[in-house]
Structures are given as C-alpha cells and as structure tokens.
Image (spheres, rainbow, N blue to C red):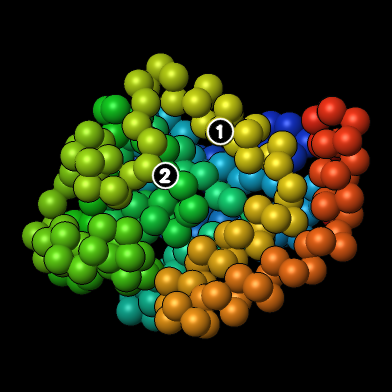
C-alpha cells in the first residue's frame, strides 16, 4: 500500500518518544522495510535534542513475532542476509542509544522481536505477553542479532542456554521470575505504567542518566578495576556540568530541578 508506514514515531512529551512497529496484520514481523525504517529512525532520534527516554512497542496485540519468514522464503540468500544485517544493526543502535530505551511488551515478543526487546535497557511486559527465542525449533537457525549473549548477561549462561537450545516460549510471569523482563503489569495498565516510568526517568539529569547507561552497558565486559576507572572517568566531569549546577540551585531553593536540554 503506497504511503503505508511500517514504523510510527510518536512524540509523547517533549522528552519522551515512542517507536511503534506497525505491521499488526503480520504480528509486527520484521521484514526488510521495517528493519531499514527502524535503523533510520534510531539513527535520527539518537541526535534529537531534548530526547531523554525512548519507548519501543508494537501496534495491535503483539510486540513482534520476529523476522518475516514469508519474506525470507521468497528471497535469495543475499537478500535474507541483508535483512538479518539490518535487524542486527537495529539491536546495536538500541543497545548504544544515548538515552534509556524501554521495551513495552504488549504481546508476543519472539525471535528477532525478543532480540529487539533484549537490546533495550528496561523491559516492561503485560501479564498476557510471552517471550522467547525459538529459532532453533522454527527456522533452523539460531538468534543472530545478539540475543543469546544479551539474555545470558541477564539470566546467566545456564538458563540462557536452556531457553535458546529448547526454543521455548515463556509466559510473562515465568519470564519475569527468571529476569527476562523487569516489570510485569496488567495489560490494561501497561501504557500508563510505561508512561509513568518514562516520566520518572525523563525528570532526572539527562547527562547523569546517559553516563549511567554507558557504565552499566560497558562494565559488564570489564574487570572490577577497569569498571571502577570507567566510573570515575564518567563521574568526575559532572561536578562542573550544567546539570550539577541546576541540581544544586534547585536544592538550595527547595524546588524540583529543571534540567536544560542538549
């Protein structure tokens, strides 16, 4: 359909934007066009002034069912590889996005769809959602966009191996108990809970939150001494920053800080 957008960008507030995967008729399966649009949108939003929180979700009743297997069956190896590469690039952009990214999991998040969620900083799921990496069972491949490594960092090597090798799907409650998702809420409250969480984060110092994200992301691959050194490197300049001055002024005036956009 000409003009039909497979990705919708919504600016919820001056500091929070939402990316909506918009192929509900295909359970938001990731085809080449959606992957390319997602890469372009993430690249553009990464430089957007004033953005402090990004939310990623799916239109309709699914977050994303993963890669579009129907498209892959109809294309050759070169095109299939290009589709996978674009999906991998999208997860890398999410992982390194300058501000926090919240995955709002409103239904099925499977295969490449769950890999997108795993690349986000925080996963909030509705109680009727389910997640998994079923590729070894359903497509004859394995999750190729970094999902196994990210899942292992969340729940440990053994549990991640069990999830990947069996291709199981996990209902939201079990996924929450295992640590695959971070917040579990009734479906009717999902959007309100995510909006509240995004507002809480957006009200804080954007420079401090961004630096904390960098530390959390990079310290996983560092030993204790290197992680401590990185923490000092990121923290020391903040005592001379505009955010620090605003926080101190607000504390003296007994008011809520109003951090400047950058």
Q: Is residue 235 above or below residue 247?
A: below
Is 167 on the left-hand or right-hand side of 16? Answer: left
Residue 195 x %, y %: 58, 29
Q: Is residue 156 above or below residue 196?
A: below
Q: Decide if residue 164 is on the left or right side of residue 100.
A: left
Numbered mark located on residue 123 in the image:
2
Closer to the N terminus: mark 2 or mark 1?
Answer: 2
Disc 1 target residue = 197
Q: Is residue 132 visible?
A: yes
Q: Say which quadrant the C terminus sits in.
A: bottom right
Residue 252 image offset from top left, x and y in percent: 88, 35
Q: Quadrant of residue 155?
A: bottom left
Along the line of sight, the residue nearer the viewer: 112 or 152: 152
Q: Position of residue 62 (x, y in %)?
A: 36, 36
The residue lying at 90 percent from left, 31 percent from top is: 253
Element on which disc 1 rests: helix
Residue at 82 percent across and 44 percent down: it is 247
- Spatial CA span between label 2 and label 1: 11 Å
Residue 131 vs 228, above or below: the answer is above
The residue located at (35%, 21%) in the rendering is 186
**Who is closer to the viewer here, 60 or 152?**
152
Among the 4 quarters of the image, the one containing residue 96: bottom right
Which residue is depicted at the point 65% across and 32% down?
199
Q: Where does residue 181 sit, x and y in percent of width and height?
A: 34, 44
For this orientation, the residue located farthest to the top is: 188
In contact (CB < 8 Å): disc 2 and disc 1: no
Indicate the secondary structure of the residue bearing disc 2: strand
């Amino acid at each position: 359909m000409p003009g039909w957008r497979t990705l919708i960008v919504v600016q919820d507030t001056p500091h929070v934007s939402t990316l909506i995967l918009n192929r509900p008729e295909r359970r938001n399966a990731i085809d080449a066009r959606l992957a390319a649009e997602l890469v372009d949108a993430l690249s553009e939003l990464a430089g957007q002034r004033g953005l402090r929180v990004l939310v990623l979700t799916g239109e309709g009743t699914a977050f994303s069912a993963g890669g579009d297997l129907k498209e892959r069956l109809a294309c050759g190896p070169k095109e299939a590889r290009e589709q996978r590469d674009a999906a991998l690039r999208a997860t890398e952009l999410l992982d390194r996005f300058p501000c926090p990214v919240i995955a709002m999991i409103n239904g099925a998040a499977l295969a490449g769809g769950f890999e997108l969620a795993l690349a986000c900083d925080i996963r909030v799921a509705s109680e009727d959602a389910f997640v998994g990496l079923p590729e070894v069972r359903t497509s004859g491949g394995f999750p190729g966009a970094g999902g196994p490594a990210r899942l292992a960092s969340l729940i440990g090597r053994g549990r991640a191996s069990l999830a990947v090798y069996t291709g199981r799907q996990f209902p939201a409650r079990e996924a929450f108990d295992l640590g695959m998702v971070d917040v579990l809420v009734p479906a009717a409250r999902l959007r309100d809970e995510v909006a509240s969480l995004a507002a809480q984060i957006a009200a804080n110092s954007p420079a401090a939150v961004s630096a904390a994200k960098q530390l959390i992301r990079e310290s996983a691959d560092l030993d204790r001494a290197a992680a401590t050194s990185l923490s000092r490197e990121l923290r020391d300049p903040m005592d001379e920053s505009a955010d620090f001055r605003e926080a101190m002024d607000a504390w003296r005036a007994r008011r809520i800080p109003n951090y400047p956009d950058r």
